[in-house]
Image (tube, grey):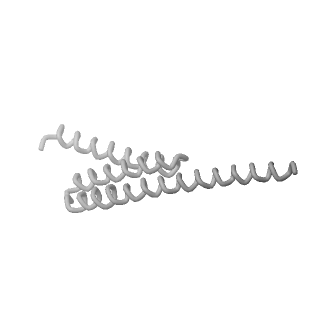
Amino acid sequence: MTGVALGLDASFDWILAFLMIATAWRALGARDGFQSVVLFITFGVMASIAWIRIGSPDLALAEAAIGTGVAGAIFVTSLAVLERSEQRDEERDAECEQGEGSDAGE
């Protein structure tokens, strides 16, 4: 390989490493659950690319399938269940508050 090609490879690796660190940091600091899950999935895709760059296609495939695909689907499903549960709790609280208000007037 020529020096230019090696320089581009190294540049790509450094950019990928920086983006992985930035994505992980944002995923940990995200206040919104959906944003955090999307950033986690994005991190998994970048990890798969990193494994390919290192020369481990078997690990890249495992990361993409299990780490990104399965875990991402579980996180999205869990987030949906959590949001539905929170919505039901809020509706129950509103019903309790309405019930208390009508009892106080009697």
Q: Going by the picture, which residue comes out furthest to the top?
A: 4
Tell me the residue at 62%/55% (across/down).
Answer: 89
Q: Nearer the viewer, residue 13 or 29?
A: 29
Determine whether, in the image, residue 73 is placed left or right of residue 96: left
Q: Nearer the viewer, residue 88 or 44?
A: 88
Q: Nearer the viewer, residue 91 or 30?
A: 91
Residue 53 coordinates in the image, percent (x, y):
23, 52
Task: State the image quarter where residue 12 is shown.
Answer: top left
- Against 31, residue 68 (above or below) is below
Tell me the residue at 33%/55% (across/down).
Answer: 68
Q: Quadrant of the N terminus?
A: top left
Residue 98 coordinates in the image, percent (x, y):
74, 49
Q: Nearer the viewer, residue 95 or 82?
A: 95
Residue 31 coordinates in the image, percent (x, y):
55, 47
Task: State the image quarter where residue 10 is shown.
Answer: top left
Q: Going by the picture, which residue comes out furthest to the left?
A: 1
Tell me the residue at 19%/57% (across/down).
Answer: 55
